[in-house]
Image: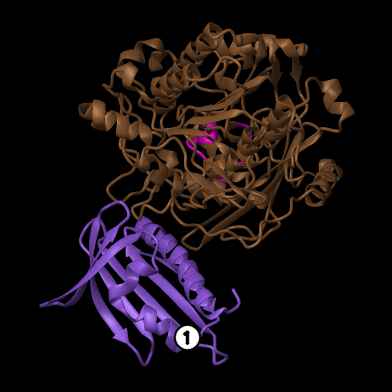
Chain colours: A purple, B brown
Amino acid sequence: MATIRREVRLHVPADEAWAVLGDPATIHQWFPGIEASSLEETDEGLVRTITLGSGVPLAELIVTNDPILRRFQYRITGGVVRHHLGTIDVIDLHDDSCLVVYSTDAEPDVMALVIGGATGNALHELQRQLESDTGGAS
Amino acid sequence: MGRKILFVTTDQQRYDTLGCNGGTLSRTPVVDGLAARGIRYERAVPQSVVCMPSRSTMLTGQHQATHGVWMNGVPLPVDAPSVAAELHGAGYRTALIGKAHFEPFMDPFGRFNENRLAALGTETVEAPQFGGGRGPHRGFDHLEFATHGATGWLHYARWLGAEHPEAVGDYYAVLDADLEVNAEGFGDTGAPQVKHNPIPRDWYHTDWVADRTIAWLDGLDADDDWFCWMSFPDPHHPWDPPQSELHRVDWREVPLPAGYPESAAEREALLDAKPRHWRLWYDGKLVSNYEAPTHWVPATLTADQVREVNALNAIEVELIDEAIGRVLAAVAARGWSDDVDVVVTTDHGELQGDFGLLFKGPYHTDGLMRLPLIWAPAPSAGITPATVTAPVGLVDLAPTFAAIAGTGGRDWMQGTELPTSDDDAAARGVERQLTSWDSELFGVGVYLRTITRDDWVCTAYLPGAVHDGTEGELYSLADDPLQRVNRWDDPSVRAVRDDLLADLWDHQPVEHEPRLELEAPV
């Protein structure tokens, strides 16, 4: 199994970042390459289905959505991914900014590079959207 | 009306695969003819020995550190400097047909421009350009992409899938089920990335690239100035040329290359005299980069497998030579021959059996570092044929194209116009080339800085996963053309080493800020 980590410091309060990152329904609005997403309650829990830019659908089981820790975790299930855990942590820096850490653990290893690369790009897009909303520094 | 430019690149081709460079396996009369009437460079060096950084250098005229594409998988920013944009701005029609690879191929999210553009089916798209403003994507007003095989997003794959879907599966599967570079071997010897490919030659990507180039040229007006980058995906692995062509070179009759020591003991002794990662990879104990099969152990490579790989590589080189000949005939038919400069080169070399290894990686020796480079200037320019021994680099291509077009260089170009003779090189102080390697794969970092100068090649290793920063390699290209004797610790050449290292560190290019991120494996 391989692990990849991407992070970005956002010049917005942690609660503001968490309001976006903790909402599983809106990922397609800030994650380039995800064209659509939908949610469904299943026997295993809440499942988010995303559609990639290539048209490929992926099911993701929501594992953790903890507003106190500000931690969001999910697993891609099926496809070529044998194992996956995506973890997003929003860490309050107590100066009206926060650190967002997006970790990807995956097997096959190559999928960590593929997904991890996309998460880095997504954090840049998130920064662009949130900081342009507030006029904050980039 | 000015000079037109046909820029021909191959992928992962060794210097010694051309007849004009002493190669004997392939018949390459077309490129040999260009060399005879043009300038043949005997020491052309890449600034990187992998595709994306090297191709980015060709386009930008910048070193890897400056354009920022430090490894395959790091996309070149869409608004990076581009010599094609310079020429387009000067009124040239501009095309890139074949393998671009400024952005990653592996793209399930559909994030990268080259893949998206191919999906759109348009000739180009408007995009931001260096220095502000907008224009055609990277300065090309016509783009048609291909790569190795027929899967993925690109134009060739779409064409083959639409017109001849039964042939898509004929190609070797470049990746395995885990999306790693495939270690599986077929052919007669089971060599990795080898397959007998039943695809008809007319449908193979080499001929498709030539066909599409001719089609684009046919659409131009007679008095158009044009810059056409015709980029063949071969002879990069997989080695799966059309089966109908296998009769050209019988691998059983292929001599072992000079760089391949047949005795395992000799191979291992040579590798042990080099920095640790050479032997670690050979033994299957270290994988530092994505570009070779993860699950293949080089120590298992047999002499017959080396023969078969070299034979299939030679066949692919012959097919490219014939494809170039067809395009030159089309150019002649338009009456353009007197005003067309033809430049033929590749992005980096291939180990192809050297030291018992295949593919590429952090190994700065001639197999990867000595490139074929031929410039046949437009006859109307009146430039005398020559052989140039001074070290030149792919970083020099963009300023050369700008000079041919008469646009002049730009301050963002870090190379210099290719010398037309050794006297020209001496007069202009063309004396060194720099190459670098940076790879980071799952915690394994490897970093090399290399200078080629005065018939020496000297590589310093920065601290990384298996290097502490004191290691290096120093080879005399004149006395040791196969780079067997590492003289890094030889006290008799300590002054040479010190001088080369000082020059190397004095000339390190400015680094791209911020550091670009690895966004995909390749």
Residue B298, image quadrant: top left
Is-magenta flag for residue B363?
yes
Query: Is B281 left, or right, of B394 in this rendering?
Result: left
Quarter holding the C terminus of chain A is bottom right
Up-down relation of residue B46 to residue B385 (above or below)? below
| Secondary structure mainly formed by the magenta segment | loop
Q: Nearer the viewer, residue B433 or B411?
A: B411
Give the percent coordinates (x, y) of residue B237.
Answer: 42, 33
Give the percent coordinates (x, y) of residue A80.
Answer: 25, 55
Is-magenta flag for residue B412?
no
Residue B406, image quadrant: top right
Structural crowding at the residue carrying mark 1, measured as other residues with C-alpha within 10 Å and reported as few (<14), some (14–19) or many (≥20): many
Residue B115 seen in the figure: yes
Residue that extends furthest to the left in the rendered view of this protein: A43
Seen at 69% across and 16% down, the residue is B377
Q: Amino acid at mark 1?
A: Ile
Up-down relation of residue B363 to residue B73 (above or below)? above
Element type where label 1 sits in the image: strand
Quarter holding the N terminus of chain A is bottom left
Q: Which residues are magenta?
A: B354-366
Query: Is B10 left, or right, of B197 in this rendering?
Result: right
Seen at 27% across and 71% down, the residue is A75
Residue A108, image quadrant: bottom left
Chain letter of the residue beneath label 1 in the structure image: A
Residue B50 seen in the figure: no
Q: Nearer the viewer, residue B129 or B302?
A: B129
Seen at 51% across and 8% down, the residue is B329
Residue that label 1 marks: A91
Give the percent coordinates (x, y) of residue B71.
Answer: 55, 50
